[in-house]
């Protein structure tokens, strides 16, 4: 479900922060997906990986048909200029958007429109990634022209709007659908585990650990699971049944990383 970050993402202020070094280079080819610039890249498992993780398809904003004009006012002003911060934590959502459209890309476009210029009026989609029932990944919040989904060229995360007050440095991954009374599809779940593993490895996050999160914009602090659900941060049903699945998801992420 959607939430803005009133303390951070929309302030338009970068704040006085030290320059962060670029993220360390990935140790394994597992991470190549995050740097992929080409459209509809199919990511295969590392040859050395023992876990038989299924590959997934990544759809860039261009691939899923994002209307980039929605991010700009009539006078050409960018409605929500991007800010970037090092990744501290990973948060899982369900979209609970109520759509019955069988075309998942159309649902992503509808969510984008609603969040960019609809009731939320963020100026863009708030999630960093979305995953459909077939396990395909959709690039979310616009993150620059370097071709790296969700990140800038230095490996920092573009701030989204998915957990109010805790968006900076917090990756938002949303599974399409309302998962309150049903599990995620096997394909969506498998992709979620793979994407979480890629991000955890890239950003040196212990998937079984906790983080002392600190919002680099507002200074608000909170101890939370390194891989959590929206409900770990706010009083919400999101991410539905995935909340109780979180311990097993973390174990699967850890197993994949250890592969
Ligand atoms: Zn949510």
Image: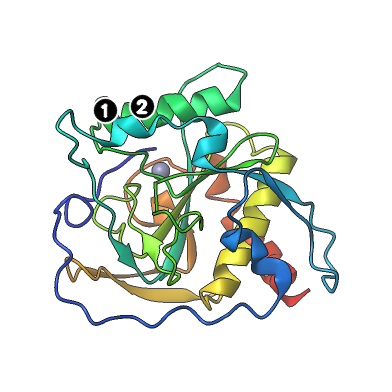
Q: Which residue is mark 2?
A: 113
Q: Which residue is mark 1?
A: 117
Between 71 and 191, which is closer to the camera in this rendering?
71
The residue located at (56%, 28%) in the rendering is 105
Left or right: 189 with respect to 70?
right
Residue 154, x across and y down, in percent: 42, 72
The residue located at (52%, 82%) in the rendering is 24
Left or right: 16 with respect to 66?
left
Residue 60, x across and y down, in percent: 55, 43
Between 76 and 227, which is closer to the camera in this rendering?
76
Residue 161, x across and y down, in percent: 31, 47
The residue located at (35%, 47%) in the rendering is 162
Circles 1 and 2, Cβ within 8 Å, touching? The answer is yes
Element type where label 1 sits in the image:
helix
Q: How many marks?
A: 2
Quarter holding ligand 1: top left
């Amino acid at each position: 479900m959607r939430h803005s970050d009133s303390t951070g993402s929309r302030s338009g202020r970068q704040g006085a922060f030290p320059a962060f070094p670029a993220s360390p280079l990935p140790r394994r080819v597992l991470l190549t997906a995050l740097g992929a610039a080409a459209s509809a890249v199919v990511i295969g498992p590392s040859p050395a990986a023992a876990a038989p993780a299924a590959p997934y398809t990544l759809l860039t904003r261009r691939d899923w048909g994002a209307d980039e004009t929605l991010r700009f006012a009539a006078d050409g002003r960018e409605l929500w200029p991007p800010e970037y911060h090092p990744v501290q934590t990973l948060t899982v959502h369900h979209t609970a958007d109520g759509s019955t459209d069988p075309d998942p890309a159309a649902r992503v476009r509808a969510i984008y429109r609603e969040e960019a210029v609809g009731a939320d009026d963020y100026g863009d989609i708030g999630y960093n990634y979305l995953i459909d029932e077939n396990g395909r990944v959709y690039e979310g919040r616009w993150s620059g022209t370097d071709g790296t989904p969700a990140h800038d060229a230095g490996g920092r995360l573009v701030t989204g709007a998915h957990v109010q007050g805790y968006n900076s440095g917090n990756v938002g991954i949303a599974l399409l659908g309302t998962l309150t009374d049903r599990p995620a599809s096997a394909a969506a779940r498998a992709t979620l585990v793979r994407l979480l593993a890629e991000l955890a490895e890239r950003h040196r996050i212990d998937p079984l650990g906790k983080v002392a999160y600190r919002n680099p914009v507002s200074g608000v602090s909170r101890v939370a699971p390194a891989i959590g659900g929206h409900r770990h941060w706010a009083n919400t049903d999101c991410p539905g049944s995935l909340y109780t699945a979180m311990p097993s998801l973390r174990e699967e992420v850890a197993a994949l990383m250890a592969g």
